[in-house]
Image (spheres, helix red, strand yellow):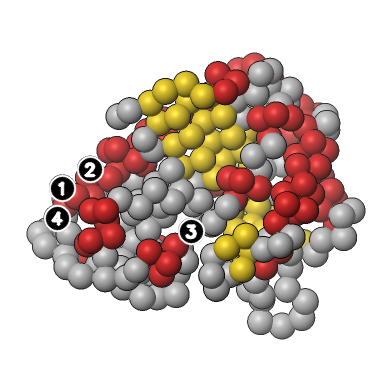
Amino acid sequence: MAHDLISGGGLRHDAFDLTRPARQAAPLVFVSAHSGRDYSAEFLAAARLDATALRRSEDAFVEEIFEAAPRLGAPLLAARFPRAWCDANREAWELDPGMFDEPLPAWVNSASPRVGAGLGTIARVVANGEAIYRRRLSFQEAELRVRLSWEPFHAALSALVAETRERFGVCLLVDCHSMPSGVTPAGEAPDFVLGDAHGAACAPRATRALEALLQARGRRVQRNDPYAGGYITRHYGRPREGVHAIQIEMARGLYMDERSIERAPGFADFQGEMAALVEALIGLDWPALLKGK
């Protein structure tokens, strides 16, 4: 895979962009697994949907919203490949047998709820339920996507987490995502949903700290409903080992036109608000928060 160095000692790889700070100031790592938008001609030719329809599965612009993190002292890892091509927030081998033209290996996880919903590692549908492909795929196609996209992305993320924990004694992984506006059926919809796997992936004090910073900015915040955290949060969040993970979902209407998938006029203001949030997070005493109850 092609790769080269970028500012701050970071790395640009075919599968991801890793931007590092000149000096890491806190045990925080930011990751965006669903904002990639490198749609290959091969993928677009195989899809029955146009590029705009495929992009509805993206967490569009999330890596831009948190782009200040490296400047402020925390690394940012962002997938370059689109979620509809290969989903880095799934296990490596959550595959739907109905999508393939041959039997899958017995070790493939074909029974997960994500697979049942059409949203496995190789998605069958986009976010609104429309089928992606004109034809069935070969297992070799899926294997190449996992080997060339999923595995390098997670190798980089695992290394960042391990490096941060070794340096600071603890690590907080902030798993950045976006959600459709109005995800709850009744009452005021939240601006943010924080997912910590109901306390299993992150120290409650740390979740409360992030919640308080958002609420101080006048934002409506919910915890674990309807998003309690996906594969990244649950896999990497191991508080007993000093690694905590929290998923942050942002309502897309805060910063983008959800229909056209374009930045809203207030995008720069929201980006600035999130930069201030990152700065406040970096300033907290994370070793104390992450070792607390």
Q: CA distance from mark 1 to mark 2?
A: 6 Å
The residue depicted at 33 percent of the width and 28 percent of the height is: 2
Q: Amino acid at mark 4?
A: Ser
Q: Kindly report which numbered mark, 3 or 4, lies closer to the viewer in this rendering.
A: 3
Contact? badges 4 and 2 (CB < 8 Å): no
The answer to which of marks 3 and 2 sits earlier in the sequence is: 3
Residue placed furthest toward the bottom? 186
Dot 4 lies on which element?
loop
Q: Amino acid at mark 3?
A: Glu
Q: Which residue is mark 2?
A: 144
Q: Which residue is mark 3?
A: 58
Q: Position of residue 248 (x, y in %)?
A: 65, 52
The residue depicted at 42 percent of the width and 23 percent of the height is: 4
Contact? badges 1 and 3 (CB < 8 Å): no
Q: Which residue is mark 4?
A: 138
The answer to which of marks 1 and 3 sits earlier in the sequence is: 3
The residue depicted at 52 percent of the width and 31 percent of the height is: 18
In the picture, the quarter occupied by the N terminus is top left
Q: Residues within 10 Å of mark 2 (few under 14, many from 20)?
A: few
Q: Position of residue 144 (x, y in %)?
A: 23, 43
Q: CA distance from mark 4 to mark 2?
A: 10 Å
Contact? badges 1 and 2 (CB < 8 Å): yes
Q: Quadrant of residue 203?
A: top right
- Residue 140 numbered tag: 1
Q: Amino acid at mark 2?
A: Leu
Q: Kindly report which numbered mark, 3 or 2, lies closer to the viewer in this rendering.
A: 3
Q: CA distance from mark 1 to mark 4?
A: 5 Å
Q: CA distance from mark 1 to mark 3?
A: 24 Å
